[in-house]
Amino acid sequence: MTFPHYPGTSSPAQQARAPVPAPPRNGLDRYFEISHRGSTVAREVRGGVVTFMTMAYIVVLNPFIIGTTPDADGLVLGIPAVAAVTALVAAVMTILMGVIGKYPFAIATGLGLNALVAFGIASQMSWPDAMGLVVIEGLIITLLVLTGLRTAIMHAIPNQLKAAIGVGIGLFLAFIGLVDAGFARRSDAGPVPVQLGYGGLLQGWPLLIFCAGLLLMGVLVARRIRGAILIGIVVTTVIAIVVEAIADIGPAVTDENGVVTRFGWQLNTPQVPDDVVRIPDLALLGNFSLFGGFDRVAVVTAMLLVFTLLLTDFFDTMGTVVAVGAEGNLLDKNGELPGIQRVLFVDSLAAAAGGAASSSSNTTYVESAAGVGDGARTGLASVVTGALFLVALFFTPLVEIVPFEAATAALVVVGALMVSQIRHIDLADFSVALPAFLTIAVMPFTFSIANGIGAGFISWVVLRAASGRAKDIHPLLWISSALFVVYFAIDPLSTLFGVG
């Protein structure tokens, strides 16, 4: 495992002793800079597989959000069709990220963004109209990349805020893992928002398997075993399949009041499927209306919806790229990712591609940190991940074998690794400590990377300006903070101007 580097964390003597990058062995090595980044083909392949296994759930989960929610006209897209386009767009855009971006970042439908599209946008118009707004948002972000504005904003973020973003995403990842596994759940006990398992108890075999998988991965990582996370996922999945075959646990079941009536698997039931191959339904490709949303709702409403999508997507990716790049020691001496323009360009196109395919906006996945944590350092890992999504397009039943309880344990382990970046934050300076804390805390507590970044930006600008250091604030940080003020105040602003 490697840990992130920020300016000032190593002495000149340590930098002088740094190993000289090995020369490329062949064309593949030269193109992806595998040896230059201290990696190997085997490590990249392994990292790509790990990333796929920790995010393959999106092929199953996104259809339940996008494919089952009716639009304003009562139209439902359907689970099989959404599953197919989810896998297809993830495959194509992740491969492009590897080939063009040349970094181990995987792309798929953004969670949170898909819920916003389903419940906040499609509820006011038809699905083609809603997806048209997603395409517009992606095209605007692409324009911002081509003009250099998106990259410039990333460079304007202070290094200590970048470190805080990494820590916040680490906690966010861990929280996702704990919640998706059922280890942490919404509580019915009055003011207590979350609780341990069901009723304060870890009930059922799946939770026990999650805990066992988490400890297994922890031991393997602590002992520096190569492929620790992948080994942990595979072993935990095999154990889960055996337990399911013996105990016949089945999926978790809740009644209409949300009370758990069966302590089963959270999403995928780990069992060998009857059918291995499933022919994909790609009928949703191109099923969007670019400006139809402006005819269904007020122009100002449509613009606010696009703005909300844009700001969330814009800064979610920014946080993910910075945090995962730091985890892989891929940042330069200024705390920046070399060639980030390529990464942001592909990510921006992915947002538009997701809308054009009706899978919702696609974005760089924070689960990419799992592959990086297992050794991935180059775009070859993304090519592997994308290829597996392409396979999943036809072999969706095989994706459903890996239970949440196996994949989510990896997210908790990676989250623990990323939290180590907190050592780069000067907590003795409260004008740094409070923005860093808000960045770190708001992400998991509101289940949004963008919200955490916004809270950090606004508080950083206010505290630095109030302490007489306004001249240290980059102009783009002022502008970004002002946009976040609008972002957080969208609801009262809409009410004020009679938009809804």
Image (tube, helix red, strand yellow):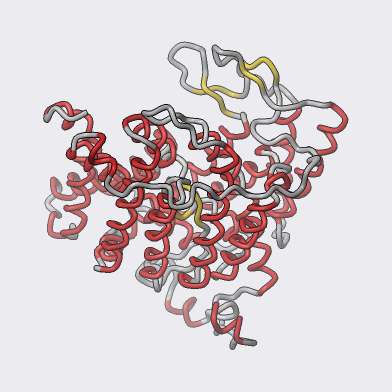
Residue 222 in view in this figure: no
As rendered, which of 472 and 362 lies closer to the eye?
362
- Dividing the picture into quadrants, the one containing residue 88 is bottom right
Lateral position of residue 383 relative to residue 406, left or right: left
Between 193 and 254, the one nearer to me in the picture: 254
State the image coordinates of residue 240 (x, y, percent, origin top left).
Answer: 78, 38
Whole-percent x and y of residue 257? 54, 12
In this picture, residue 63 sits left or right of residue 215: left
**Quadrant of the drawing holding the N terminus:** bottom right
Residue at the (54%, 65%) spot, across then down: 95
Q: Image point 70% across, 27% down: which residue?
A: 251
> Is any part of residue 99 visible from this angle?
yes
Q: Quadrant of residue 241?
A: top right
Location of the C terminus by quadrant is top left
- Position of 138 relative to 462 (above/below): below
In front of the other: 67 or 145? 67
Give the image location of residue 298, x and y in percent.
19, 35
Q: Is residue 209 above or below residue 287?
A: above
Image position, residue 417 (x, y; %): 56, 52
